[in-house]
Image (cartoon, rainbow, N blue to C red):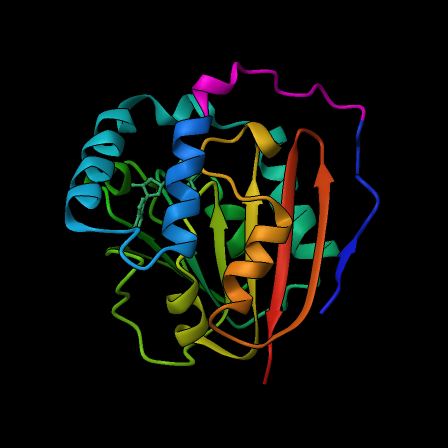
Amino acid sequence: MALTYLEPLSPGSAAVDRPPEAYLPMQEVTRQIAFEEGGWHPERMAKVTELFDGLAAEWHSRGGVERLAPTRDALERGGAPAGGRALEVGSGTGIQTEVLRSRFDAVLSVDLSSKMLARAPRRAGVLLLRADASRLPLKEASVEAVVCVNAYLFPAECARVLVPGGRVVFVSTSGASTPIYLPPEDVVAALAAVAEVAEATTSCCGSGSWTVVALGR
Ligand SMILES: C[S@@+](CC[C@H](N)C(=O)[O-])C[C@H]1O[C@@H](n2cnc3c(N)ncnc32)[C@H](O)[C@@H]1O
């Protein structure tokens, strides 16, 4: 299955230039979670919960329209369905949720951190739920899209909860400098290890990047 590379959108936007030590350790954790059996374990879950509980109070300062543009672009040019139900994994304080709500009829926003969720605005058509995305309290084939913005990819759970032909939308708002990041080829490979991949598209938008993968019927 070929990965289609679309032209970058607004490539003139300022690139994020952080020292690699700021993001490489978390990128390795992200890779382990996506690829390794046992990559997500109770100790790691406790550390991640503590980390994001601690960041919740200042997370809103990471908002801004430029951080929403890659998600909008992923949904539009990546061919995500319009309407239906979306699961937002690692929704944090809900910065990205409005973009999803404008595309889907209903959004289930899931996060491990109760402190992040407590700061998310309440919106019509959006259900907030504290849950671990590695063990979602959802039936099989219950959503049309799983959206991870700066969030870990749990391939087996994506495949289980998506309807046949559903999409995984993986967005990194600072591209390859995003701490929770996987290169597009790895997003596809991690999903292909657990499900049939029907189609995959990737691109950049501003300083962000995204990959959309349609799983087979
Ligand atoms: C980097 S933040 C991104 C938040 C939001 N998507 C954004 O872009 O502003 C990652 C979020 O994923 C959540 N998270 C980490 N592991 C998770 C898991 N296993 N299940 C659900 N949420 C998780 C964290 O609590 C945190 O809120």
Image: magenta residue range:
12-23
Residue 177 counted in the magenta span: no
In the image, residue 16 lies in the stretch drawn in magenta: yes
Q: Is residue 123 visible?
A: no
Residue nearest the observer in this picture, 174 or 183: 183
**Residue 40, image x, y percentages:** 27, 51
- Please say whether residue 207 is visible from this viewpoint: yes
Q: State the residue at coordinates (63%, 29%).
A: 66
> Residue at the location (50% across, 60% down)?
190
Which quadrant of the figure shows ligand 1?
A: top left
* Residue 70 horizontal side relative to residue 9, left or right: left
In front here: 28 or 104? 28
Q: Position of residue 136 (x, y in %)?
A: 28, 66
Q: In the image, is 12 to the left or to the right of 125?
A: right
Counting from the top left corner in percent of width and height, residue 191 is at 52, 64
| Quadrant, the N terminus | bottom right
